Image (cartoon, rainbow, N blue to C red):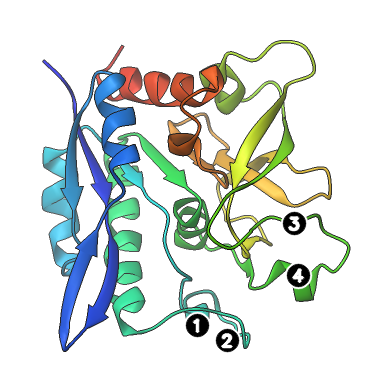
């Protein structure tokens, strides 16, 4: 039986109503890994515990920016957020905490990595180009930037990726925000060459991992599908 994997959806407000979207790459990556993907639209935070009881694992997908008051900071001029993102953030923070309390696996991707960090009390760099002017490009309009990432070993992430050699991989990147102060109970386990944190995971070994890059967009990179394969196996209790 395929484990039930909830994937959170992007949320936008248009013409007075909320729409939910999810790139099919997430769905196909989970299906190839042996999971049964289920779209999770943002809803009331009170629904989080019910979902946590029914799901075998969740993937926090990419999207726009978290309202910075969630981590105690005023908004940067380049922060892209609105009431729809507030609704999504409230729901997903509650969902992360419910899943963590239930001991179930969580994989955060891009925004999902940032949300995971905020849910555990961490903070974010709101705009890499202006706050870290010496950083390499992490985003390009309408396409991904590729750069290397060094994964710390030992770590659960390195184990899931089945890395050898120097623990370095090439990733597809599209973000202007990143982890600043790592959340309580998490640890940084991957870095870009400029020092930007590229992944976090639970410090106690629980199956909670966030990656700043987009493995669902790297179908030709073996390490990308290995991440989904390992996550789904973990959700299946293997």
Count residues near mark 1 (Cα–Cα under 10 Å), then give few for <14, some for 14-19, many for 20+.
Answer: few
Kindly check if marks 4 and 3 are in contact, taking CB atoms under 8 A apart as contact: no
Q: CA distance from mark 1 to mark 3?
A: 26 Å
Mark on residue 231? none
Identified at 31% across, 11% down, the residue is 238
Q: CA distance from mark 4 to mark 3?
A: 8 Å
Kindly check if marks 1 and 2 are in contact, taking CB atoms under 8 A apart as contact: yes
Frontmost of labels 4 and 1 is: 4
Query: As displayed, is residue 46 above or below residue 185?
Result: below
Q: CA distance from mark 4 to mark 1?
A: 21 Å
Name the secondary structure under disc 1.
Answer: helix
Identified at 11% across, 15% down, the residue is 1
Q: Report the residue marked by disc 4.
A: 129
Q: Report the residue marked by disc 3.
A: 137
Q: CA distance from mark 2 to mark 4?
A: 15 Å
Identified at 67% across, 72% down, the residue is 127
Name the secondary structure under disc 4.
Answer: helix
Frontmost of labels 3 and 2 is: 3
Q: Report the residue marked by disc 1.
A: 69
Q: Report the residue marked by disc 2.
A: 75
Q: Residue 183: x percent and y percent?
A: 58, 56
Name the secondary structure under disc 3.
Answer: loop
């Amino acid at each position: 039986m395929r484990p039930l994997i909830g994937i959170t959806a992007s949320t936008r407000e248009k013409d007075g109503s909320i729409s939910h979207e999810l790139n099919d790459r997430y769905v196909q990556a989970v299906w190839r890994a042996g999971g049964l993907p289920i779209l999770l639209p943002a809803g009331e935070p009170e629904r989080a515990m019910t979902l946590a009881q029914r799901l075998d694992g969740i993937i926090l997908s990419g999207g726009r920016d978290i309202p910075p008051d969630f981590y105690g900071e005023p908004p940067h001029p380049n922060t892209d957020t609105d009431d729809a993102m507030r609704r999504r953030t409230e729901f997903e923070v509650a969902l992360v905490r419910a899943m963590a309390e239930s001991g179930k696996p969580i994989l955060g991707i891009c925004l999902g990595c940032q949300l995971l960090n905020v849910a555990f009390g961490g903070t974010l760099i709101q705009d890499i180009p202006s706050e870290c002017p010496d950083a390499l490009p992490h985003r390009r309009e309408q396409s991904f930037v590729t750069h290397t990432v060094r994964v710390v070993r030992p770590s659960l992430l390195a184990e899931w990726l089945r890395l050898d050699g120097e623990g370095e991989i090439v990733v597809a990147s599209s973000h202007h925000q990143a982890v600043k102060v790592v959340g309580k109970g998490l640890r940084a386990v991957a870095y870009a060459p400029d020092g930007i944190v590229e992944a976090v995971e639970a410090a106690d070994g629980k199956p909670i991992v966030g990656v700043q890059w987009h493995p669902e967009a790297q179908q030709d990179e073996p390490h990308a599908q290995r991440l989904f394969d390992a996550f789904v196996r973990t959700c299946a209790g293997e």
